Image (cartoon, rainbow, N blue to C red):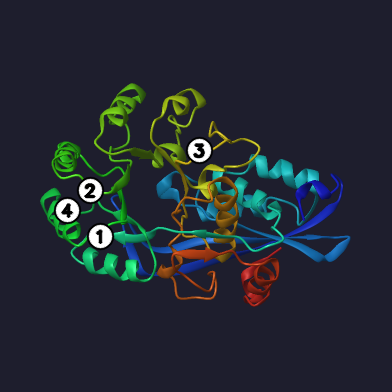
Amino acid sequence: MPAHDLQPDEPLQLEWMRYRREMDPPLRTGRTLLAERTGLLLRVTRERAPLESFLGEIAPLPCMGSESTADAEAFLRSLPGIMTFREYQSAAKRAGSAGGFGMQSCWQSLPSQPSSIRSAALLELDEAAPSKLARAREAGFRTFKLKCGFQEITTEVKNWECLREGLREGDRLRLDPNQAWRGKDWENWKHLLRRDPAPVEFIEEPFPTGALDARQLLEEAFTAPVPLALDESLSGPDGRFRHPEFLRKWPGWLILKPFLIGFPGPQPLGIPRNLSGKTVFSSVFETGIGLSRLIHLANHFAPEIDHGLDTGKHFNDELGLGHSGPRLHALTAGEEESLWTTLPASWKQR
């Protein structure tokens, strides 16, 4: 049910559940080691029609610039248990970046037919990368995102060269050092890719925070041997590269994390709504409810792209989509409600 079918003065009841999910295996990035995720599942019920409810998710990731789960929960506790739709919308605008979009995610209307989208495989550029990529290819993946930047450059290049030997025609690679390439690392990679071209679709955020200003970043993007992509520069606390003037000049890709930056929403923070074919929607390890929202968004804005949603394989619990692989299917409204009702009542707050 779309939000515009609710009347401004209609009373709503808000419940939420705080979740904690252990990641198995953890994921190494150039910024941190992710071993668990915490967040909040939301359920909004119409007081006048208690069988009609709306589900959403708040999925903070402080290392990427959002508020913490504790901050988001404290904000929810400050709200009345029952409020009008107008009051709810006003509260969402006052919430943090993750909390605001999470509250708005309750109103994303579900399509009449279940959405599905292709995903890139999420891997680490380590010594096991060649065998893991081969298995992912056999499973049907065609695009492979490689987390890197967590090893010495000599080790990283050695792993890359081993990976290159096993690539096949049609394989597409994405490198993601998470702003961890320092000093001469970027120069080494540029030299390597110019000397030995590879099917690299783009490199996400190779430069440390603050290393380049806008002019320098654009210059690197226009002269790099492969396209560059913005990720942390869009979701970080300053967001200095997400302003319209800069984005109109940006020649590379955009990696959008809606649960951190709030796109799409009432304040899109400079991100263009008429997205091109160089836009990837990316998960921050949400539950199946959050992933379903991302699948709907990706299917609406960029249906031909392989998106960054291969995160469910890191969990062994009942909070996911219930499947993984190169094509992901969103939960139906009934499946989302079943997920909520099967969770322990002691987890839920009102």
Residue 329 percent location from the top left of the image: 56, 65
| Amino acid type assigned to the residue bearing label 4 in the image | Glu
Residues marked 4 and 1 touching at CB (< 8 Å): no
Using the image, tell me which numbered label, if any, was put on residue 156.
4
Quarter of the image holding residue 348? bottom right
Q: Earlier in the sequence, mark 4 or mark 1?
A: 4
Using the image, tell me which numbered label, if any, was put on residue 276.
3
The residue that disc 2 covers is: 198
Cα separation, mark 4 vs mark 1, equals 20 Å
In the figure, is residue 26 to the left or right of 186? right
| Amino acid type assigned to the residue bearing label 1 in the image | Arg
Residue 244 percent location from the top left of the image: 51, 26
Cα separation, mark 2 vs mark 4, equals 15 Å
Residue at figure coordinates x 37%, y 40% from the top left: 229
Residue at figure coordinates x 70%, y 71% from the top left: 334
| Amino acid type assigned to the residue bearing label 2 in the image | Ala
Q: Quadrant of the N terminus?
A: bottom right
Query: Crowdedness of circle 2 by 10 Å Cα count: few (<14), some, many (20+)?
Result: some
Q: Earlier in the sequence, mark 3 or mark 4?
A: 4
Q: Residue furthest front?
A: 169
Using the image, tell me which numbered label, if any, was put on residue 168.
1
